[in-house]
Amino acid sequence: MPTSRRVTNLALLVSIGLVLSIIESTFPPLLPVPGAKLGLANIATVLALYVFGPRMAIEVTVLRSILGGLLRGSVVGLFLSFSGGIVSTLVMIALYLLLKRYLSIVGVSVAGAVTHNVVQLAAAFLLIQHAALFFYLPYLVLISVPTGLFVGFASRRVAVSLQGVSPATG
Amino acid sequence: MERTTKSVTGKIKAGDIVLVALVIAASIASMVPVSRASAGEKGSLAIIEVNGEEVRRLELGDNQGCRTLRVQGAQGASTVVVEYGTVWMAESACRDKLCVGMGRIDSTGQSIVCLPNRVVIRITGGGKPRDVDAITE
Amino acid sequence: MKQVKAILNVILVTALAAGTVVLVAFLSGRNSGEKDYRSPTLFAMDTTLEITIQERDRESSEADVDACVALVEELESNTSRFTGGSDVWLVNSNAGQSPVAVHPETLEIMRRSLEFSRLSDGAFDITMAPIAGLWGFYDRNYRVPTPEEVEAARSLVDYGQVLLDEVNQTAMLAQRGMEIDLGGIAKGYTVGAMCETLRNRGVKHGLVNFGGTVGAIGSRSDGKPWSIGIRDPRGEACDLLGKLEVEDAYVSSSGDYERFFTRDGKRYSHLFDPHTGYQPTGLLSVTVVGPDPVDADILSTTIFVLGTERGFALLKVRSGYEALVVEADGAIKMTDGMRDRYVTEVRERL
C-alpha cells in the first residue's frame, strides 16, 4: 500500500475513533469510576486490526489516546485511556494472531473491551489508591460484554462493506 | 500487507460464545465476594469537616494502623486518632470535651460532633448501607 | 451441526439477557444512589444541621441547602438571646419598660408557646431563662445554686406576664429582670420552615436533622419510610435504644443528656421544672412524633417535665402526636399509637 494511502487510512480511522469518543463523552457516566465508559471508540481499533493489520491497530490506538486526551484537556484521562487502550489492543492482536481459528471479530472485540476496562480500573487505582474502586470491577467487566459485542458486530458490518474497496487492491 | 478481509466475514465461532459466557460467569460470580470484601471493611472512609467544610478524608481499613491528625477548629486544635478501623477525638480545644467523651466510632453513618470547635468526624463509604437515616436526640 | 449451532445461539441469547438484567438492575440502583445528597454538618443556633435530599441533581440539592441555611440565619438573627438587636434580645432588654416590635415569626413562636403554657398549666414556660442562667447554662460557668437563689429566680418565671399585642405586632415582659429563651422551640419552627421551603422547591424525598429535631419530607426514594434512630440517653454517641419509621412527619426528643454538667456525681441537665426551678427527675428522655415540629418540640420538652402519666395525657390536646419515654429506672414506655405506627425496633429497657 502506498504511504500516502496508508496515512490517509490511518487518519480516517483515528478521526472515526475520536468522533466516537466525543459522542460517547456526552453520555452520563455509567459508574462512579474515573474513565469508565462504553468504549465505542474501540470500533476504530478493531477495524484497523481486521482490515489493515496489527501495526495499524497500534498506531490508531496510540494516536487516538493522545489526541483524545489533548482534546479533552485531561492528562489523567490521557493516562487512563492510553494504558487501557494499548494493553487491550495488544491483547486483541495476540488473540487475533493466535486464536483466529476459534475467535471471530466479535469475540476479539469483547476480549478487548474487557481488557480495556480492567486495565483502566487498575490505572485509576494507581492514581486514587482507594481499594473501594475494585467493588466496581465485576460490573465493569459485565458492562464490557454488551459493549464488546456491539463493537464487534458493528466492526464486522463495516469491514464487510469495506471488502469491495479492499485497501490492497482498491 | 497481508489481505485479512476474508477473516472478518467469518460467522460467530464457538470460541466467541465460550469467551462471552466465561466473562459473564466470572463477573457475576465475583460480585458477591467482591462486594462482601468491600462491605467487610466496616466503614471505609472517615471524613473530617471543620465548620461545614471537608478538610481531610482518611481511609479506615483494619490494616491502616494508627494515625494521628490535628485539625484547626473554631476554638483551637482538635486531635483525631484513627486506629484499626475505628476513629475518635483524642483531644479538643473545646471546653466541655463532650466530643472526646463520645468514644470510638467504626461504622458507616456514625459521627462525632464537637459543637464548640465545629469539628465533625463522620464515616462514609464501604458497602454497608446506613442503618438509620438520622438520629433524634 | 445445525443443532449445536442452535444450542449455542440459545446459550448466547440467555447469557446476554441475564447480563442485561443484572446490569440494568445494578445501574438503576447506582443511579438512585448517586442522586442522594447529604450536606456537610453545618452549625447554627448552637447546634448542628444536616440535610439529606434524594432524587435530585447535585446543583439543585446544593441550592436547596443554601436556601435552608439562609432561612436558618434569618430566624437565628431574630430569635437568638445573644445577638444584640434580635427580637428576643430587645424584648429581654426592655423587660418592665416598653413593648417592642417583633417579626411575625417571632410573635407566632411566642403565641404558640404561651398556648402550651396554658394547656400544660405552666409546665412549659419560655420565661425560664433566669433559672437556666442561674445554673450557668448560658455562660457555661456551671454551678448548683442555693435554694434561696432558685426561689428568687423563680419569681421571675411567669408566662402570664408575657404580653403580646397581635394588632401592633409587639411583645413585652411585664417585670424587670424577666427573660425569655426561644432556643428550644425556635429550632422546631426552623425545621418546619426548612421543610416547607424544600417542598416548595420541589423536593420529594428529604430529611432535615437540626440538633436532633428531625423533619421528614415524603419517604426515602426507594419507597421505604425514613428510619430514625432514638438515642440511648445513657449510651455513647450513636448508641440507639430503638428505631422509628416515619414519612411526612416530625420527630423531636428531649433528654437530660443533651446539655448537662456533673457535680459530686450528680447530673444536672438544662431542662427545668418551672414550678420548682430544679431539674425534673422522672424521665431520662422523651421522643415525640407528630405532624408539626413546633408542637412536637414543645410536647417533648413538656412531657420531660410532667412525667409519663401527665405527659401522655397532655398529648391528647393535639391529634396525631405519639410519644416514647425512658423513665429514670430505665423502663421504656410508649403510647399505643407510637408502638403501632412508628416503632420498628426497641429495647425492653435500658
Image (tube, helix red, strand yellow):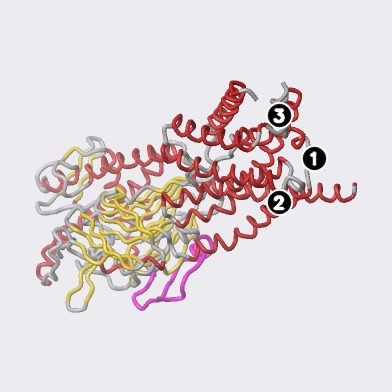
Q: In whole angstroms, how far apart are the C-alphas of marks 2 and 1?
A: 15 Å
Badge 1 sits on which subunit?
B
Q: Quadrant of residue C117?
A: bottom left
- Badge 3 local density, few (<14 within 10 Å), some, or many (20+)? some
Residue bounds of the magenta highlight = C325-350
Q: Position of residue C114 (x, y in %)?
A: 28, 51
On the rendered structure, is B81 left or right of C308? left
Which residue corresponds to the image point at 75% horizontal and 50% vertical from the top-left?
A: B15
Magenta-colored stretch includes residue C58: no
Q: Which residue does the numbered mark 3 point to in the structure image? A: A158
Q: Which residue does the numbered mark 2 point to in the structure image? A: B19
Q: In whole angstroms, how far apart are the C-alphas of marks 3 and 1?
A: 15 Å
Q: Position of residue C18 (x, y in %)?
A: 71, 51
Q: Quadrant of the N terminus of chain A?
A: top right
Badge 2 sits on which subunit?
B
Q: Position of residue B108 (x, y in %)?
A: 43, 60
Q: Which residue does the numbered mark 1 point to in the structure image? A: B11
- Please tell me if label 3 and label 1 are on a single chain: no
> Is residue C286 something that shows in the picture?
yes
Q: In whole angstroms, how far apart are the C-alphas of marks 3 and 2?
A: 23 Å
> What amino acid type should be assigned to the residue bearing mark 3?
Val
> What amino acid type should be assigned to the residue bearing mark 1?
Lys
Q: Nearer the viewer, residue C184 or C72?
A: C72
- Badge 2 local density, few (<14 within 10 Å), some, or many (20+)? some
